Amino acid sequence: MPESISQLTAIWNRSLKRIKDKLGDDHIYDTFFGGSYIDSVQGDTLLIAVNSSLGATVLTASYTELVQSCVQEETSTNYKVEFVNQGSLKAAPLEKEEKKPTFFAEARLDPKYTFSNFVVGDSNREAFQAALMISHNPGGTYNPLLVHSQSGLGKTHLLQAIGNEIKARRPMAKVLYISASDFVDEYIRFATGAKQDQSLSQYFKNDVDVLLIDDIQYLIGRSKTMEMFFIVFQALYTQGKQIVITSDQDPSRLEGIDERLKTRFSSGLVLPIQKPDLKTSEAILRMKIEANGLSAKDFDEDVIEFLASRFSSSVRDLEGSLNRLLFYTINLEPTQHITMDVTKKAIASLISAQESVGKLTEDKIIATVADYYSLTPAQITGKIRTSRIAMARHIAMFLSRSLLDTPFTKIGNSFGGKDHATVMNAVSKVEKSLKDDESLKQAIDDLKQRLKAK
Ligand code: ADP
Ligand code: MG
């Protein structure tokens, strides 16, 4: 008799495949079976939790036999099935009244990242295709999928698009998008013993159907967290749940990631995103222009080509150059038609920033730290104090102080008007942690390297 949750989940997943085939109607299947699971086994009856009370009624009246026969084929046992509404199960008092911590309460998908606003070209076609396939059939053939590229080439966009598409197709699916650094934060926050470890892995088993984990390289140097991640990974993987990972390197080159994880990653599908070719960069620009409510016709053709070739090493920079140009032509030199002249003026400072090797500024530090932690500069200088943002902010302040020797008050001004004491505390906190936090040391070294390369 199946006992563990993972056994029940596996049985149900396989039965669902049969049910789906027999039904032959994806719409009915998604509507009524979406988010269903085996709640428990009671004698010879499987209690199937479904997504609404209407669903429970309809399934009981019309599909009991079909479901029983599929389960029978899967388990060779004559289970009866009963359908109950998940809502009513949750309302019932828990057997053991134990407070479960809420994990990843802040994790959200960002609806702005979709497949329809992702421009496909030779540089990203395969990654796009795999992402699309996965969102139509999570947990299917491509598991896990790992997409890797340099920064700014669309990994986060694709990862989020997978999540948004799955949610659109199956609203009940439990999709978790987090960056590996969120995972580190959460682990540090909750897991201080075996019991907490267990409740974190229970959370993944029960409350996550699809795990989208961004920038896996943040696990490097975090051996305990990595161990936990391995457990989570295994649990999800053996339950047939979809896992998608991004990283800044091919997994074989991810120095410092557990070999067992690397093996697991490599056993799935590993795809790179390359820098876009000129044609793709131009197509991206045109799309971003339209997305801003303008028309590519308002731009001289050579402007588009100029920007596309100049900023092709990162789509993020390409977008940045367009935003700069739009800001300039709306606020500083209003014009109907955007010519090469105006463009050069508008982005002169961006280009000189690209070219001014060695000239470090606070803005560059903020931008580099933001990029390193997958945040925006506005988050770094803003007020939100989630641990990842606050840590990145403190590091940026520390770097401004130690590399530029900027007075605390001035740093405070550059960081959205924070006061002298706040900055001083942040800097001394980082200084203190540096003494015994290897991974922080590593991060600061990496950041210094990156800033040198600017
Ligand atoms: P990464 O995660 O690889 O650093 P992001 O996914 O954050 O990169 O992409 C940076 C920016 O570029 C985002 O605003 C994203 O929407 C945009 N972008 C990247 N690739 C494409 C693409 N192929 N089509 C449209 N926008 C893209
Ligand atoms: Mg990213």
Image: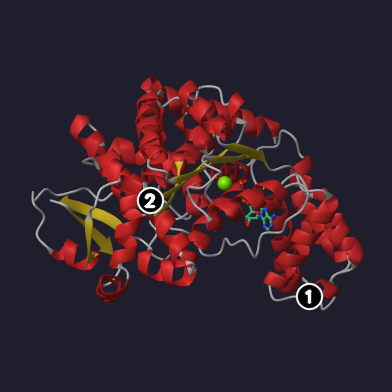
Left or right of 376 on screen, residue 283: right
Q: Quadrant of residue 448?
A: top right
Estimate how packed mark 2 is, as few (under 14), some (14 to 19) or many (20 or more) residues with alpha carbons within 10 Å. Answer: some
Residue 57 image offset from top left, x and y in percent:
25, 75
- Residue type, mark 2 in image: Asn
Q: How many marks?
A: 2
- Residue type, mark 1 in image: Ser
Left or right of 221 on screen, residue 235: left
Q: In the rendered image of this protein, does residue 252 appear above or below residue 105?
A: above
Left or right of 281 on screen, residue 104: left
- State the residue in front, 310 or 130: 130
Query: Closer to the observer: label 1 or label 2?
Result: 2
Going 56% across and 43% down the picture, which residue do you hit? 142
Going 33% across and 58% down the picture, which residue do you hit? 69
Residue position for label 2:
13
- State the residue in front, 15 or 210: 15
Q: Which mark is residue 295?
A: 1
**Which of the two labelled residues, at mark 1 and mark 2, occupies the earlier sequence position?**
2
Q: Are marks 1 and 2 in contact (CB under 8 Å)?
A: no
Residue 34 image offset from top left, x and y in percent:
38, 63
Quadrant for the C terminus, please: top right
Estimate how packed mark 1 is, as few (under 14), some (14 to 19) or many (20 or more) residues with alpha carbons within 10 Å. Answer: few
Secondary structure beneath disc 1?
Answer: loop
Quadrant for the N terminus, please: top left
Secondary structure beneath disc 2?
Answer: helix
Residue 122 image offset from top left, x and y in percent:
78, 49
